[in-house]
Amino acid sequence: MERKLINRIESVGKYNQNLYIILDKNNREIKIWGKTQLDELMSEIEIEDYIRITYNGCKTTNNGHTMKVYYIERRETYGRKD
């Protein structure tokens, strides 16, 4: 189910993570902490765009760490003035 991105806050907390604030279907705010791969995908998303984030499990990186993998679908807000 797609949701609307309403805010992006950068460099939050002890680890300087990104925080994404999304509205659910009942207009409640959902806060999602960024991860390396998710931050990269979200860099293409504009505030007010509708998105669907899908978690696709984990994969092992070249240096042996485990990384969560996401997929994002985006629908731009019509009439947006950039």
Image: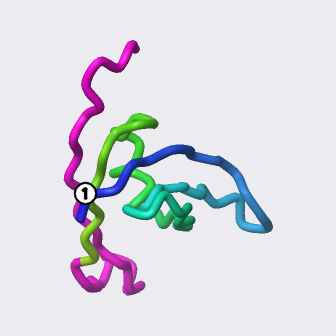
Q: Position of residue 70 (x, y in %)?
A: 28, 68
Total marks placed: 1
Q: Is residue 69 left or right of residue 64?
A: left
Considering only vertical position in the picture, is 76 above or below 81?
Answer: below
Residue drawn 56% across and 44% down? 7
SS state under label 1: strand
| Kind of residue sitting beneath label 1 | Ile
Residue drawn 23% across and 65% down? 1
Badge 1 is on which residue?
72
Colouring of the image: rainbow
Residue farthest toward the top in the current orientation of the protein:
81
Q: Position of residue 19 (x, y in %)?
A: 59, 58
Residue drawn 21% across and 41% down? 75
The reply to whether the magenta stretch includes residue 34 is no
The reply to whether the magenta stretch includes residue 70 is yes
Magenta stretch bounds: 56-82
